[in-house]
Amino acid sequence: MDTNSVKQSVVESYGKLAKSTSSGLFSKLFACCDPSDNAQQVGKVIGYSEEEMNAVPKGANLGVGCGNPSALAHIKNGETVIDLGSGAGFDAFIVSPLVGTQGKVIGVDLSDDMLDLARKNVKKGKYTNVEFVKGDIEELPLESGIANHVISNCVINLSLNKGAVYKEAFRVLKEGGKLSISDVVLEKELPDFIKNSLVGHVACVSGAEPLEDYLQYVKDAGFKNVTIESKSTFPLELMLADPQIMKVAKLLNYDLDSAEAKDIASRVTSISLSATK
């Protein structure tokens, strides 16, 4: 897979998700994250409180995260927070009351449709301290040293150049600024039919890399105090139920019985990490 095809596939798929959300018609686009009626349940499982989820506009929580990065950030009034891959604005809206009227939340996303949905949610929620800008997280359209915190939720794994993402996060942070990330990593290599599949990539897993390699990207960018705050299994069984993944498996004569499915699921882990500049 080349970088451009992956980015295009991600943008198109998330664009469809945004459109289906805006129209009120949810489609099961991502087998790893079902953006339907169970979004609240998913949110609770990955660390959001009922209060947080009920405080954001309807349609902001798409159920596509793998953790709650804002819970790690210890965000204060008056600070600036950047959300990488902000989607419909869920995490940005949760952070909004924490930074207050003197602070700012900047969401960055590459999908025009998702940005449109996020901006509609800004109006619905009457947020005055949240804005969304179009940009590639590997090359942020933001000035250096403007943020107190950078957060991201299950997005950086989609990038084929994670090192660039973390260097950009480091660049836009102020000295002493904090990184708070939730993402997926590998405990063991995935089968080629998933690893080489665009469908699997958009489904949040085929872009995942070994934990040691992932942490090295963070350290190489210049971050200190890199800490894994939490670690949990990732429901890859849901991805294996995706018809497109199953079709690829069948074409490659890969028999996914229950034992194999459980084995593959055990290879992927969700982590939340923090670091400082």
Image (cartoon, rainbow, N blue to C red):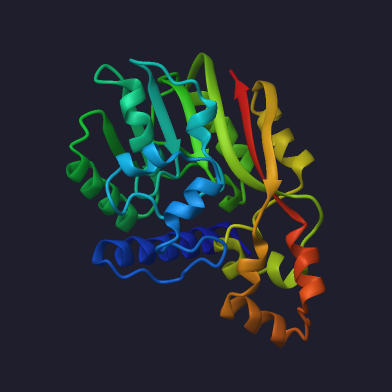
- Residue 156 seen in render: yes
Percent position of residue 195, x then y: 70, 64
Q: Quadrant of residue 76?
A: top left
Q: Is residue 165 left or right of residue 253?
A: left
Q: Is residue 246 left or right of residue 147?
A: right
> Which residue is farthest front?
50
Percent position of residue 219, x then y: 70, 27
Classify the position of the N terminus by image quarter: bottom right
- Residue 64 seen in render: no
Q: Residue at x 31, y 39 (%)?
A: 55
Q: Residue at x 43, y 56 (%)?
A: 39
Image height of 95 relative to 4, above or below: above
- Please tell me which residue lies in front, 143 or 183: 183
- Please tell me which residue lies in front, 77 or 50: 50
Q: Quadrant of residue 3?
A: bottom right
Tell me how many marks there are.
Answer: 0
